[in-house]
Image (tube, grey):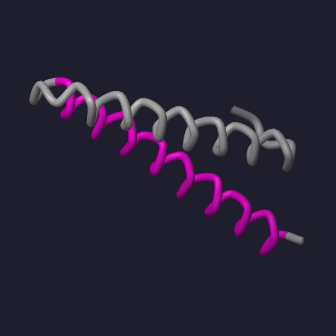
Amino acid sequence: MGELMSQQKQTASRRGWLAVAGWIGTGWAIFAGHLLLAMLGVGLAVFLTRRWFQYRAQWGMRF
């Protein structure tokens, strides 16, 4: 049981860091002035963040 929970935490952590990377990339695109790339980045970052939240909620993890 502990191994399964450890794997879930690892997956949640990986998804969380992907979401953070998406927001950082979007920030850099805005800073660089690439508005179209920034709009695409916002969409991707929102998708990744939502996926992370849903995964944590599905397994009953605390935020």
* In this view, 6 is above or below 34: below
| Residue ID at (68%, 57%) | 9
Work out which residue is located at the far front of the displayed protein and give it: 36
Query: Is residue 36 toward the left or the right of residue 55 in the image?
Result: left
Q: Position of residue 49 (x, y in %)?
A: 57, 37
* Front residue (pair 62, 24): 24
Q: Position of residue 31 (x, y in %)?
A: 14, 25
Work out which residue is located at the far left of the displayed protein and give it: 32
| Residue ID at (76%, 36%) | 62
| Residue ID at (69%, 37%) | 53
Query: Which residues make up the magenta segment?
Result: 2-30
Q: Position of residue 4 (x, y in %)?
A: 81, 71
- 11 inside magenta stretch: yes
Query: Is residue 48 toward the left or the right of residue 52 in the image?
Result: left
Query: Is residue 7 toward the left or the right of residue 1 in the image?
Result: left
- 46 inside magenta stretch: no
Quarter occupied by the C terminus: top right
Q: Quadrant of residue 41?
A: top left
Query: Is residue 44 toward the left or the right of residue 55 in the image?
Result: left
* Front residue (pair 2, 20): 20
* In this view, 45 is above or below 30: below
